[in-house]
Image (spheres, rainbow, N blue to C red):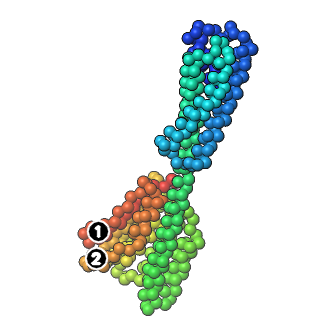
Amino acid sequence: MYGLLIYFTIRLLLDSVTNMKFWNRSWLLNGGEMVASVIMGYLLVWAFRRLFRYFDTHWGAVFSYKRIAKELWYVFLVNLVLVNAIGTTLASVTDDGLQWYDLADLNTIPLLYAIIYYGIVRSNDFLQAYIANKIQLEKITNDKLQTELKFLKAQYHPHFLFNALNSVYFQMDENVVEAKKSIEKFSELLRYQLYDQQQTVSVSRELQHLNNYIEVQKTRTSERLALDVQFDPNLNGQQVYPLLFLPLVENAFKYVGGEYWIHVKAAAEKTRIMFSVENSIPDDYATKRKQGIGLENLKRRLELLYPGKHSFAAEKVDNRFIASLSFYTES
């Protein structure tokens, strides 16, 4: 097809200039020229493909103007050698011999088709290589994010263990029986974090885990703590990533003071889940507040797990601290 396309284009131009009708020539001559053109077409396509494979082997996925210019230069040379070796030789022994316009047509028309062929084939090759590189880059990026998530979880677990064990430690001096109950709750918390974690969990399981944590924390707080927990009954089967709510509640128990109250609220609005924690703070909150890893880890996990689909805010307002987050789920 490639060789015949070149042949009939050249014949069209020559017949237009010389007023010749090639179909009035000997069909033996026409057939010989067509066979020679087909052979030339096969040789050109074979040479071009070998050339492209050579560049792909030595240049890999590096695409630049320098590479394209170099490839086109070699396409030009290959085309020049093969076309003149076959086409010019053939033209010199047919009709009225080799004329200047024969040379012009033989060196112009095949070159134009060679450039078109190069553009079609290489654009497809470069596109496939670009797509493959993008897929590989996304895979590497995803693996990196998964590694970072695992690191954040590994960093969070010791943080959680420290605070929970600290709660039981204070309780041991006052009520051993209650301390044993706290350890049972504590074991349930650990089981959820170490054994029952999946990639996502139902929000009802996450809230149950949060309730267990609150029960453990209540054992070390004063009886005057006013604790208000409100969970929307519509929060049931939605799938969420685990351990997103806990850092906010943990932070509230850690810094509660002043009027000594904590409000925890979770609600659902279609595919959006909203969670907020408010707590009163002591007058010397600014001096007691430290930059812990809990909230920082939470921010980073939200960025990785719900990119562009979440909001997070934590700020001091008058004599209270408000932390809230929301994100969209698929179910």
| Up-down relation of residue 63 to residue 267 (above or below) | above
Residue at 38% of width from left, 76% of height from top?
253
Q: CA distance from mark 2 to mark 1?
A: 10 Å
Residue positioned most to the bottom = 173
Mark 1 lies on a secondary structure that is strand
Mark 1 belongs to which amino acid? Lys
Viewer-side residue, 295 vs 261:
295
Seen in the image, is 325 located left or right of residue 125? Answer: left
Q: Position of residue 165 (x, y in %)?
A: 47, 83
Quadrant in the rendering for residue 53? top right
Q: Nearer the N terminus, badge 2 or badge 1?
A: 2
| Up-down relation of residue 64 to residue 229 (above or below) | above
Label 1 Cα crowd, 10 Å radius (few <14 / some 14-19 / many 20+): some
Residues at marks 2 and 1 touching, judged by CB atoms closer than 8 Å: yes
Q: Position of residue 226 (x, y in %)?
A: 35, 75
Residue at 63% of width from left, 23% of height from top?
88
Residue at 56% of width from left, 68% of height from top?
197
Q: Position of residue 145 (x, y in %)?
A: 50, 61
Residue at 44% of width from left, 92% of height from top?
173
- Camera sees residue 106: yes
Which disc, if any, is residue 316?
Answer: 1
Viewer-side residue, 105 vs 238:
105
Which disc, if any, is residue 110?
Answer: none
- Camera sees residue 259: no
Q: Position of residue 213 (x, y in %)?
A: 47, 75
Q: Quadrant of the N terminus?
A: top right
Residue of label 2: 285
